[in-house]
Image (cartoon, coloured by chain):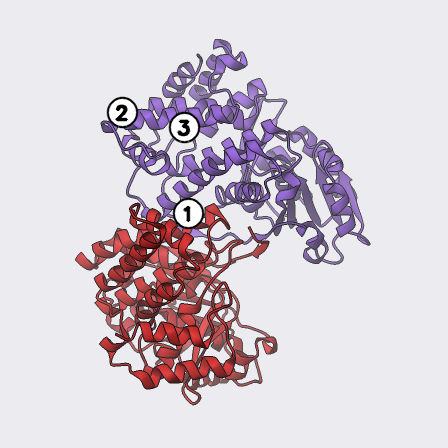
Chain colours: A red, B purple
Amino acid sequence: MRNFTFQNTTKLIFGRGTIAKLAQEIPAHARLLLAFGGGSVKRNGVYDQVVAALKGREWVEFWGIEPNPRVETLRKAVALGKEHDVDFVLAVGGGSVADATKLIASSIRSALDPWDLVLNENKLGEILPFATVMTLPATGSEMNRGAVISNDATGEKFAFYSRYPEFSILDPETTFSLPDEQIAYGICDTFVHVMEQYMTTTGQSPLMDRWAEGVLQTLIEVAPRIRADKHNYDAMADYMLSATMGLNGFIALGVSQDWATHMIGHELTALEGISHGQTLAIILPALLRVLRDQKQDKLVQYGERVWGIVEGSPAERAKTAIERTEEFFRSLGLATRLCELGVGEKTVEEIVRRFSSRGTVLGEGRNVDAEKVAEVLRLCRS
Amino acid sequence: MRNFTFQNTTKLIFGRGTIAKLAQEIPAHARLLLAFGGGSVKRNGVYDQVVAALKGREWVEFWGIEPNPRVETLRKAVALGKEHDVDFVLAVGGGSVADATKLIASSIRSALDPWDLVLNENKLGEILPFATVMTLPATGSEMNRGAVISNDATGEKFAFYSRYPEFSILDPETTFSLPDEQIAYGICDTFVHVMEQYMTTTGQSPLMDRWAEGVLQTLIEVAPRIRADKHNYDAMADYMLSATMGLNGFIALGVSQDWATHMIGHELTALEGISHGQTLAIILPALLRVLRDQKQDKLVQYGERVWGIVEGSPAERAKTAIERTEEFFRSLGLATRLCELGVGEKTVEEIVRRFSSRGTVLGEGRNVDAEKVAEVLRLCRS
């Protein structure tokens, strides 16, 4: 096991009716900025619950944070926060709103442009405290320091690290009204978060392996229940908890990580506007096929423990494990090939060009270079 | 899944050579009280590492915290802390020293006797920040709020809840010199901590079930490796991590808990001085036998997932799962019957009398009353 340092200070408030606890968690005299997405929280009753919980408080509202939040939008939120001299930011929505809030809270007291902070985290100064009311389980943003921010002007999409949310409220009932495809993207996103922290090499930590496998098994177990009935509270609760636990550091103690699938997927989102979870369903199986020899031992362990694959040679078992993974994504209703979404050679070439010009090498073995990225993308084309 | 609130703020610093990080974690001008056990840290080099890390700092030392720390001892540590007006307490040792430190840190700024605070947590006032250098994986005390404190004068042993350690440093190499029986007690303690949070009813949370099973599987996997070679760093590291993760709240999100085994075991320690881990090895199998019908579904799940038991009727599988658990404890070199330790009817009667007079009912079903406690104790007599 590798040496590690771990600390996650977020308070998790989980369950039915917990939005009512907002008032007791936010400091009494806080000047609040509330950050929202496109308006679904007005239709599903979440906004009304928040307003009821904050009765007697004052706040300003910023609406319109989009999926894959753009710095162009967030600059407006930062300006609003500065104008009203707010000192606490509350995100109400999904992972995009939570991610956006991390950059907003980091920028309100800064003289720098938010994109400067994304590019230069060493320039981070005072970060306002912030919290989330999470309505879409997927990104784990409610209990980690990370965010992913896009820049329309440059066509870029980068990770950014701020501080932990003070608290996050997760009421599984707020997810009942999510569109089917959002749930599918979210389950896939959670699954791949876990795979990025797990599908590396064997023998690093038996405990972390078991915990990662436990999240994967749980997702496989609850996904069909959720597809059968989105109002199944217990299934949604376990999916929501899995999404949080899948990316809050709990399964990454002392082990190496990969993240190549995410890095390639981000480019597909930046260039083609494909939903994040959907990009992962396409990239992961192809990446595993390209790296099958390197990851074979772990693929065999994964196949046996998560999918019950115990027959065949190690190479065959690894191959079957990848097939089962792709089938799982398809069972969620997701595409697993670029051609299904009309993405062609031009996009593939541009992504390869970007990795090549950046000189990035990805993966736990630091061997996924532009050439390997090209191999992955061509393999998932058709 | 039940509603829950979770927050664990402890910073975990894990791995080889990490004691050297002490100085950067403790505030620069802290007036330190260092709390120690009986002196093993002087023999195994840990004390020297701490002294080297704190070079240039000033501190007072309190030595002599015993296993199952007694309030009589801790009063002396509190007096020393008051005398020197310390404002930070560092525990160096095992779970007993960590537990003791929680009460010491809670008492130094209080006018009340420490035992008053154990009995009346609502009287807790200012609690000094504290941290641990953990040298014996077992109690999880390095990353939770709990402690267990004994009172010699009254023959009592009670749980006490303070705050989370600021940080805990865990270097698996510090465990290499532990006596075999301490390791056996520690593995058993960790195993039973997990069982107390898991062996209740099925279907509460698939994810929490998988994570609890993951800790149990890890302990079963690493225990023989550790018995074969105490200097196996990776095995010791995973055991140490399992001990922390087994009682830091991570596997208890939204599920019911039992804790009857611990409550009965505490009485055996208080009356007979039997090591905590040893009492659990005796009580758990008997408790599971007494509650086999009530816990049958969970025992069957446990048997299948943790021990691979897939043959027989549910009742037979549950019975086999309990037998395998008892065999595991015996494989650690522990006794699993009271007669092996010379405990007789008089002690059994006194324990039953205590539960009867307190009117306590234990377990997730709140149905383990004095009569059931008597049944458990008589079943594990011979």
Task: Read off the residue under disc 1.
Answer: A210
Label 2 or label 3, whichever comes before in sequence order: 2
Question: Which quadrant holds residue A272?
Answer: bottom left
Q: Residues within 10 Å of mark 2 (few under 14, many from 20)?
A: few
Which chain hosts label 3?
B
Cα–Cα gap, marks 3 and 1: 20 Å
Answer left or right for A40 relative to B120.
Answer: left
Residue at 46% x, 13% y: name it: B349
Residue B348, above or below B117: above
Q: How many marks?
A: 3
Question: Which quadrant holds residue A3?
Answer: bottom right
Circle on res. B325: 3
Residue A259, above or below A381: above
Task: Read off the residue under disc 2.
Answer: B316
Residue at 33% x, 25% y: name it: B320
Where in the figure is residue A351, as x and y percent of width and height? 40, 81
Cα–Cα gap, marks 1 and 2: 27 Å
Answer left or right for A287 relative to A365.
Answer: left
Q: Nearer the viewer, residue B270 or B360?
A: B270
Q: Residue furthest left?
A: A228
Residue at 41% x, 38% y: name it: B197
Where in the figure is residue B32, as x and y percent of width and height? 74, 48
Looking at the picture, which amino acid does disc 2 mark? Glu
Where in the figure is residue A340, as x and y percent of width and height? 23, 76
Q: Nearer the viewer, residue A341 or B338?
A: A341
Instruction: Identify the element where label 2 is drawn.
Output: helix
Viewport quadrant of the C terminus of chain A: bottom left
